[in-house]
């Protein structure tokens, strides 16, 4: 007996705060990508009704216009009430993401053969939050290090990047930045080899952009809920120029999971067809996704400024239910040195830097080192300098 026909769930997608590779843009600190599960027919009827009921002075819904006046904000509230349980939105703090990318392209290549050990103890989050905090505290050398790294990713050329690879001593830098910089200098060749492998590829062109990873993670989440997805996106250069990861998911029925830090994460999803790039005026589902993504960047940016009164309090409840666990935002819990796990990551960083300077293999008995430090910390035999 043949398998029953699978009805694909339509997913409409849009983004807010896009600045491409430039994660140091000061005007838009957050980026969000929104997906909404809704049929074309329902979206069309809903948008037409909202425009009529809230007297929207336009023929389509745009968050940046709705947020400017009272009726528009009421329309946004209505959209949230209706779709918050059918929205999945990923939010990224751009500067923190750059710190995470730093780990990915500086530390990861040197420990790739046993990277699971480091991910399982959240060493990547320790480094990411550490660099981000140094940057936020207006540490001059941290800022220069970030800007050097950004230039390295942008040009794939390490010439003139004195803060990242220079041999001169920095007199007023923090000990953390000094350790990270020493690590960079020691592994310059490995870092360059990683970047060389990306030249000429789509990944290389959009190496810091957050669009592809955002959509892929959200569709993986939807894939746990629906057997097959029919995906519609607003025009997007990164997605259109890097289609390979999504095209590989067409009629992909197998379920694959990866364990990271003791938790299983879905890898992949089943697409009914390649992603369709459409005009928001013709596909109202995109308009709903536009509002959803705009809400998140707006609220997160207002919260960062302490302007909590600039939007209705009830929005927070809806956003909590819609935000994806794959959002990447700072969490200074990973720098709480009262926790043994954080202390262990500090000593691990010290050990990696020491091995780098003394040209000792980074992964030689590294699991035993982690076990030893963990035991000593529980026995209160170590203390942070």
Image (cartoon, helix red, strand yellow):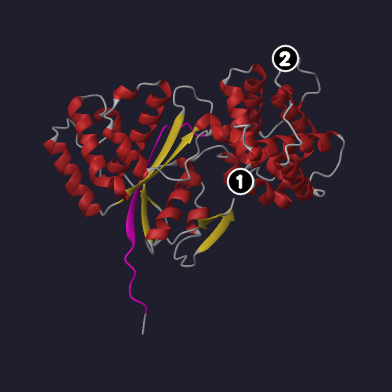
Residue 285 vs 125, above or below: the answer is below
Residue name at image x 64 percent, y 28 percent = 151
Name the side, left or right, on which 149 lies relative to 279: right
In this view, which residue lies farthest toward the top?
A: 172
Report x, y in % for residue 275. Answer: 41, 53
Report x, y in % for residue 173. Answer: 71, 18
- For mark 1, give the secondary structure: loop
Report x, y in % for residue 229. Answer: 37, 59
Q: Is label 2 in contact with label 1 (beta carbons under 8 Å)?
A: no
Of the residues tagged 2 and 1, which is closer to the observer? 2
The residue indicated by pointer 2 is 172
Q: Which residues are magenta?
A: 3-20
The answer to whether residue 7 is magenta is: yes
Q: Is residue 60 visible?
A: no
In this view, which residue lies farthest toward the bottom?
A: 1
In this view, which residue lies farthest toward the front?
A: 379
Disc ID at residue 201: 1
Crowd around label 1: few <14 · some 14–19 · many ≥20 (10 Å): few
Give how far apart the Cα atoms at labels 2 and 1 are: 39 Å
Name the side, left or right, on which 355 lies relative to 122: right
């Amino acid at each position: 007996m043949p398998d029953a026909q699978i009805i694909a769930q339509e997913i409409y997608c849009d983004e807010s705060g896009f600045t491409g590779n430039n994660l140091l843009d000061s005007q838009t600190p957050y980026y969000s990508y929104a997906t909404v599960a809704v049929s074309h027919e329902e979206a069309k009827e809903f948008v037409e009704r909202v425009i009529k009921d809230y007297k929207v002075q336009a023929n389509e819904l745009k968050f940046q216009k709705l947020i400017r006046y009272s009726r528009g904000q009421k329309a946004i509230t209505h959209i949230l009430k209706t779709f918050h349980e059918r929205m999945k939105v990923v939010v990224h703090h751009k500067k923190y993401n750059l710190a995470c990318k730093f780990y990915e392209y500086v530390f990861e290549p040197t420990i790739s053969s046993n990277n699971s050990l480091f991910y399982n103890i959240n060493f990547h989050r320790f480094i990411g939050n550490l660099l981000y905090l140094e940057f936020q505290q207006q540490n001059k050398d941290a800022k220069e290090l970030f800007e050097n790294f950004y230039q390295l990713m942008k040009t794939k050329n390490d010439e003139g990047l004195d803060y990242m690879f220079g041999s001169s001593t920095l007199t007023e830098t923090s000990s953390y930045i000094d350790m990270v910089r020493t690590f960079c200098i020691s592994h310059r060749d490995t870092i360059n080899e990683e970047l060389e492998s990306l030249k000429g590829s789509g990944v290389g062109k959009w190496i810091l952009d957050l669009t592809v990873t955002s959509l892929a993670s959200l569709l993986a989440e939807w894939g746990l809920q629906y057997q097959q997805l029919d995906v519609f996106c607003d025009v997007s250069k990164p997605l259109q120029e890097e289609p390979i990861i999504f095209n590989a998911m067409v009629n992909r029925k197998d379920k694959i999971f990866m364990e990271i830090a003791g938790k299983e994460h879905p890898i992949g999803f089943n697409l009914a067809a390649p992603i369709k790039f459409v005009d928001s005026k013709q596909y109202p589902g995109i308009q709903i996704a536009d509002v959803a993504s705009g809400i998140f960047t707006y609220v997160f940016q207002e919260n960062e400024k302490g302007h909590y009164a600039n939007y209705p309090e009830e929005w927070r409840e809806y956003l909590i239910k819609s935000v994806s666990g794959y959002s990447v935002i700072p969490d200074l819990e990973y720098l709480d040195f009262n926790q043994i796990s954080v202390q262990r990551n500090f000593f691990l960083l010290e050990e990696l830097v020491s091995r780098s300077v003394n040209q000792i293999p980074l992964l030689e008995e590294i699991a035993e080192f982690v076990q030893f430090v963990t035991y000593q910390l529980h026995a209160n035999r170590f203390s942070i300098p």
